[in-house]
Image (cartoon, rainbow, N blue to C red):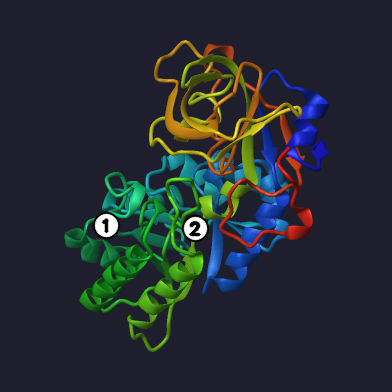
């Protein structure tokens, strides 16, 4: 992978006509170190967030050795890098073929479920294996999340006790898990989730071997500025202490966005300006999906070749390059008033889901990926002042 000191150096050297994706390995290392040092348990990286090989290898180098996977393809990609890496199949709905292949071909023991039918599937597909680690996923409130996952996944509280008792009969290692939703904006959600686990422990008199508090840890966007992640970890520790268990189960989590969001950005070019609407060469069918449907506002900055930049800022919205009117990002994206055709814009926080959502709709697709060493546009982690570069 070709490397540049800054995005400005990249643009001045390549002058790309297609969108360019940037990876900042230092950002991944910084976020991984933060989680490894401060989270009170084991970390499973959610591969769906960004499965790029360079990203995965950087996570491994940074101390992340366990992975939350949702498909056979994800398992294959992780095992291809290092067959000794541990994968947990945490998607609650899987085909029998996928379960069978995961267990017998790849040695996966950990599976998630939220129904009796899924439990039966897992048992039958593994020939009633005796070494399974089964996680019952509990539905909890997603009220503080930007993206609600509770409608699709998790057993409700009225049915959870029965499913836990049943699953406990067939597993070597019982886990209880929950997910507070993607981009969770308040740490209290984790306390509530842990409290729900505590209620189920009291009802069933079954203490799990593992408590999985899921993902949902946030990153920072211009209109979504969460509390410090230290506050999230303190809230989690408080919730676990409130369980008042003689011996605390193993604790695991499944971060994705918080580990890699800052590491990725996309550089786009303006194809046309229509007043406050910019038509750019990437969009919701490319790396900018989250800017459309959930309307996440990416941090943005204009990259120029040295011409004067207006100090007056204007709120723009974006249209992508396809013929579909849904290829639209409302923003607002704050950029200089004198932006024009052929100007380059860097959009940040795209290390999470930017690469995974790309399609080839209308023939628009770019796989130009480079490494840069400068700082991300926004960060929740301490900046490395030795690698700061002035905006040109």
Q: Which one is nearer the viewer's eye here, 247 or 41? A: 41
Quadrant placement of the C terminus: top right
* Residue ranking furthest to the left: 158
Q: Classify 270 as above or below 295.
A: above
Q: In the rendered image, which quarter is residue 346 located in?
A: top right
Q: Which one is nearer the viewer's eye here, 167 or 377? A: 377
Instruction: Assess disc 2: are there few (<14), some (14-19) or many (≥20) residues with their C-alpha within 10 Å of its C-alpha.
Output: many
Q: Classify 234 as above or below 4.
A: below
Q: Which one is nearer the viewer's eye here, 92 or 309? A: 309
At which x and y percent is residue 28?
Answer: 66, 54
Q: Which one is nearer the viewer's eye here, 368 or 8? A: 8
Q: Is residue 7 left or right of residue 69?
A: right
Whether residue 59 is visible, yes or no, is no
Whether residue 388 is visible, yes or no, is yes
Residue named by callout 1: 141
Name the mark on residue 44: none
C-alpha separation, residue under disc 1 versus residue under disc 2: 17 Å
Residue named by callout 2: 254
In percent of the image, x 48 and y 41: which residue is there? Answer: 98
| N-terminal-most mark, 1 or 2 | 1
At which x and y percent is residue 2?
Answer: 82, 36
Q: In the rendered image, which quarter is residue 270 located in?
A: top right
Tell how many labels: 2
Q: Classify 286 as above or below 197.
A: above
At which x and y percent is residue 280?
Answer: 56, 20
Label 1: state its secondary structure. Answer: loop
Label 2: state its secondary structure. Answer: loop
């Amino acid at each position: 992978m070709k490397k540049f000191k800054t995005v400005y150096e990249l643009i001045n050297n390549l002058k790309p006509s297609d969108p360019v994706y940037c990876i900042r390995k230092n950002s991944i290392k910084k976020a991984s170190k933060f989680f490894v040092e401060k989270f009170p348990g084991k970390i499973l990286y959610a591969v769906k967030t960004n499965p790029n090989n360079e990203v995965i290898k950087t996570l491994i180098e940074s101390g992340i050795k366990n992975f939350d996977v949702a498909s056979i393809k994800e398992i294959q990609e992780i095992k291809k890098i290092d067959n000794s890496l541990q994968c947990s199949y945490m998607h609650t709905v899987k085909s029998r073929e996928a379960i069978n292949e995961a267990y017998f071909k790849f040695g996966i023991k950990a599976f998630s479920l939220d129904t009796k039918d899924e439990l039966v599937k897992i048992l039958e597909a593994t020939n009633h294996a005796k070494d399974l680690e089964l996680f019952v996923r509990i539905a909890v409130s997603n009220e503080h999340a930007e993206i609600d996952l509770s409608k699709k996944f998790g057993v409700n509280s009225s049915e959870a006790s029965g499913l836990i008792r049943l699953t406990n009969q067939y597993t070597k290692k019982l886990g209880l898990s929950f997910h507070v939703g993607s981009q969770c904006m308040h740490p209290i959600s984790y306390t509530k989730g842990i409290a729900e686990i505590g209620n189920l422990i009291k009802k069933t008199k079954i203490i799990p071997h593992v408590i999985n508090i899921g993902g949902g840890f946030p990153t920072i966007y211009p209109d979504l500025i969460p509390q410090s992640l230290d506050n999230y970890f303190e809230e989690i520790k408080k919730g676990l202490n409130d369980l008042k268990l003689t011996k605390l189960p193993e604790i695991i989590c499944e971060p994705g966005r918080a580990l890699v969001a800052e590491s990725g950005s996309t550089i786009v070019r303006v194809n046309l300006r229509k007043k406050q609407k910019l038509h750019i060469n990437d969009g919701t069918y490319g790396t900018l999906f989250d800017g459309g449907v959930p309307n996440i506002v990416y941090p943005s900055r204009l990259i120029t070749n040295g011409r004067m930049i207006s100090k007056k800022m204007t709120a723009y919205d974006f249209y992508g390059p396809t013929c579909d009117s849904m290829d639209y990002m409302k923003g607002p994206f704050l950029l200089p008033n004198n932006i024009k055709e052929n100007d380059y814009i860097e959009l940040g926080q795209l290390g999470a889901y930017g690469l995974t959502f790309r399609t080839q709709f209308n023939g628009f697709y770019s796989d130009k990926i480079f490494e840069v060493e400068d700082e991300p546009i926004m960060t929740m982690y301490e900046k490395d002042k030795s690698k700061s570069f002035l905006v040109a």
